[in-house]
Amino acid sequence: MSPNDPAGPAAPQVKALNCPSCGAALTLRSFGNAVSLVCSSCHSVLDATDPDLKVLQKFKAAEDEDSPLIPLGTRGSLRGTDYEVIGFQRRTIEVEGIHYSWHEYVLFNPAKGFRYLTEYDGHWNLFSILRSLPEDDSGASTVTYLGEVYRHFQTADATTTFVLGEFPWRVRMGESVTVSDYVSSPRVISKEGTGKEVTWSMGEYVTCGDLWKSFNLTNEPPVPVGVYENQPSPLSASVKSIWAMVGMFLIASLLLLVIVYVTARSESVFEQTYSFDAASHDEASFVTPVFALHGHTSDVELTTIASLNNSWIYVNYALINQDTGRAYDFGREVSYYSGRDSDGEWTEGSNTNIVTIPSIPPGNYYLRIEPESDPALGVILYTVSVKRDIPQLIFFGFGILAILIPALFITWRAMNFEHLRWAESDYGTPPDDGSLIGTLENLASNFKSSNSGDDE
């Protein structure tokens, strides 16, 4: 109710009439505004502007009759305005020999005039006629309205295949108009007409759940099928914000990595070369001199380099704190093989093995070393070196993956949503509109196309 009009909008004018063709009772809900009226009994199209309701057209609809999901006469509130459903029509297009139909409902309010609800496969849009024309470049695939760009989605000839109720225009069964839709989700601009008579309207996507509440309907609403042309994506806004967060995280990670590398000591604390003969009967196990790990708790990197040629050595290590007796046990194998076969030269393994022991407290340490190998391999020289406080890129990699994987998954879902949307258009693929999703979709489409060309 308007504060300047305590009485509220005027009640819809209703007039009882009789069909001149079959005598059935008719109700004219938008008296004075209707141009056409369709009898629900005999399906005669009547001239609502003629006091005698002149019959304009008759059609048979026994096998082709449609029942509105929102019955005529139903009232509901949309965006704060009360509307009554007064008309219903089905329109059909043909694409590659297949017929597709959608439903349109005429809504009326004495103060606001007419609005239109469309439904296709459970997807609904609320339309109103545009008071000003969009900027239409006939040579481009876009139109601009109030600074917003709408991209061409589809053009088809739509034929009226069923009508019921009253309409503010001269409705006729079998009448065809050319309809072009331009999309900027969640809105769509529709251009329809024949020749020079063109009507522009704007629709906005609404959910069937909201409509059913607005009209207080008790029947079950249709379940939406697929992705509709202007259906809002639940993920597009998330993709932009998520990638903004990813960018900030990557910048912060890079700065942290620089700080870690600058402040890391990367200090060499021990290095010694040993020889091992597995055929010898001497005790293989021995301990190294004590070396100190200064500063804070940090990782320790132990490197084993062996002089190998088609041979191997396995070394059992124990890093032992001289003061506390705590030991960190681990073993490393170093092996290297090479040769030549029918495919050419090959190599396997490496002469070097590196292992990192994390979170080693400062203190005095020594290594207990016990090598193993094949006695037939002879003497093997190997070098053991220890460094402390070495930056580990792997942890930064894990952190980056932890945020990249969810971001990539959400982006993939958003791209898939847009792909399903534009798969029903005249183009089959999303346009490259400069957005992240559009650009990625365009790249993906080009990649698929190039691969298909290679296959052929």
Image (cartoon, rainbow, N blue to C red):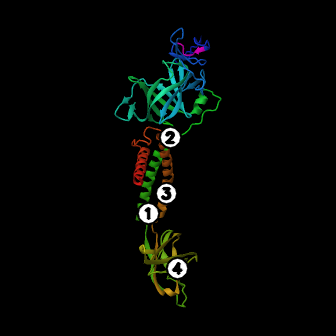
Q: Which residue is mark 1?
A: 260
Q: Which residue is mark 4?
A: 314
User: SS at mark 1?
Assistant: helix
The local crowd at label 3, few if under 14, some if 14 to 19, many if 20 or more residues have their Cα within 10 Å, is: few
Residue 427, percent across and down? 42, 40
Q: Is residue 277 visible?
A: no
Horizontal side, residue 106 vs residue 452: left or right: right
Q: Nearer the viewer, residue 184 or 293?
A: 184
Depicted 114 relative to depicted 388: above or below: above
Depicted 425 relative to depicted 1: above or below: below
Q: Which residue is mark 3?
A: 401
Depicted 444 relative to depicted 302: above or below: above
Q: Nearer the viewer, residue 176 or 305?
A: 176
Estimate the spatial distance between the alpha carbons at disc 2 and disc 4, rounded to whole Å.
57 Å
Q: Earlier in the sequence, mark 1 or mark 2?
A: 2
Estimate the spatial distance between the alpha carbons at disc 3 and disc 2, rounded to whole Å.
25 Å
Looking at the picture, which amino acid does disc 1 mark?
A: Val
Q: Nearer the viewer, mark 1 or mark 4?
A: 4
Looking at the picture, which amino acid does disc 4 mark?
A: Tyr
Q: Nearer the viewer, mark 1 or mark 3?
A: 3
Estimate the spatial distance between the alpha carbons at disc 4 and disc 3, rounded to whole Å.
33 Å
Horizontal side, residue 151 vs residue 18: left or right: left
